[in-house]
């Protein structure tokens, strides 16, 4: 589990990343053009067909930079995985100073590192969440949804239906997987929603 200090450091790096690539953010829905950023960073993109526990990988060797994602996932999950791999690049590779002629950098995004996700995977996931669903924009959208009169009626009828509706709204707004929208609510301590949303 990442500490509050580690999470803050990752969020600061993600905010700097977003400032640097602000022109690649499109308004409604809020959408970070990750493909354009990868092109700007000179990353080749590829897909592969593997079991679902392997989501993607980052490979850097000599002058080759490649991010590949599992073609078995839906579009928003592939986008989130690309952000995850960029997270590995921004958080790990850039600080390693590797001699790439002798030792290539390879990182796999898998479901698990042993029984729980290892720190590097948790960090890359959190980086991806921060760039695709920034704290303030995400919280603003939660409030926008909750203040809507129709949604208030839905809340009074069924908290589960309300939670499912807001998670769907957030996933559609930020073009992230539903599971990532639930996790982002947990990360930002928007407690009532993840408790009642259908997983």
Image (spheres, grey):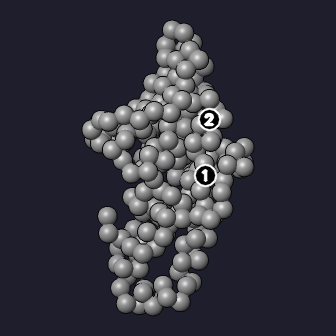
On the image, which quarter does residue 135 sit in?
Answer: bottom right
In front of the other: label 2 or label 1?
2
Q: Nearer the viewer, residue 187 or 44?
A: 44
- Is residue 107 shown left or right of residue 34? left
Q: Is there any visible trace of residue 33 in the rendered image?
A: yes
Q: Residue at x 62, y 65 (%)?
A: 28
The quarter of the picture where the C terminus appears is bottom left
Q: Which residue lies under the disc numbered 1?
A: 32
First along the sequence among labels 2 and 1: 1
Report helix, strand or loop for mark 1: strand
Residue 151 place in picture, x, y as percent: 48, 84
161 over 123 or under it: above or below: below
Numbered circle sitting on residue 124: none
Q: Residue at x 30, y 40 (%)?
A: 53
Residue 15 place in picture, x, y as percent: 66, 49
Report helix, strand or loop for mark 2: helix
Q: Which residue lies under the disc numbered 2?
A: 39
On the image, which quarter does residue 179 sit in?
Answer: bottom left
Q: Residue at x 49, y 17 (%)?
A: 104
Q: Nearer the viewer, residue 48 or 176?
A: 48
């Amino acid at each position: 589990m990442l500490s509050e200090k580690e999470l803050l450091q990752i969020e600061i790096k993600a905010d700097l990343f977003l400032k640097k690539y602000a022109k690649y953010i499109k308004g409604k829905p809020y959408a970070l053009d990750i493909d354009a950023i990868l092109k700007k960073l000179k990353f080749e993109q590829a897909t592969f067909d593997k079991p679902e526990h392997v989501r993607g990988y980052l490979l850097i060797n000599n002058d080759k930079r490649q991010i590949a994602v599992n073609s078995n996932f839906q579009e928003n999950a592939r986008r989130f995985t690309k952000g995850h791999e960029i997270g590995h690049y921004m958080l790990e590779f850039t600080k390693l100073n590797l001699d790439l002629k002798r030792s290539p950098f390879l990182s796999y995004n898998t479901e698990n590192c042993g029984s729980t996700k290892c720190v590097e995977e948790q960090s890359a996931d959190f980086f991806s969440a921060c760039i695709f669903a920034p704290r303030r924009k995400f919280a603003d959208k939660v409030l926008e949804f909750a203040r809507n009169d129709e949604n208030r009626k839905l809340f009074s009828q069924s908290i589960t239906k309300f939670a499912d509706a807001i998670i769907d709204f957030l996933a559609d707004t930020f073009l992230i997987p539903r599971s990532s929208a639930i996790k982002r609510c947990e990360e930002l301590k928007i407690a009532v929603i993840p408790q009642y949303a259908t997983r």
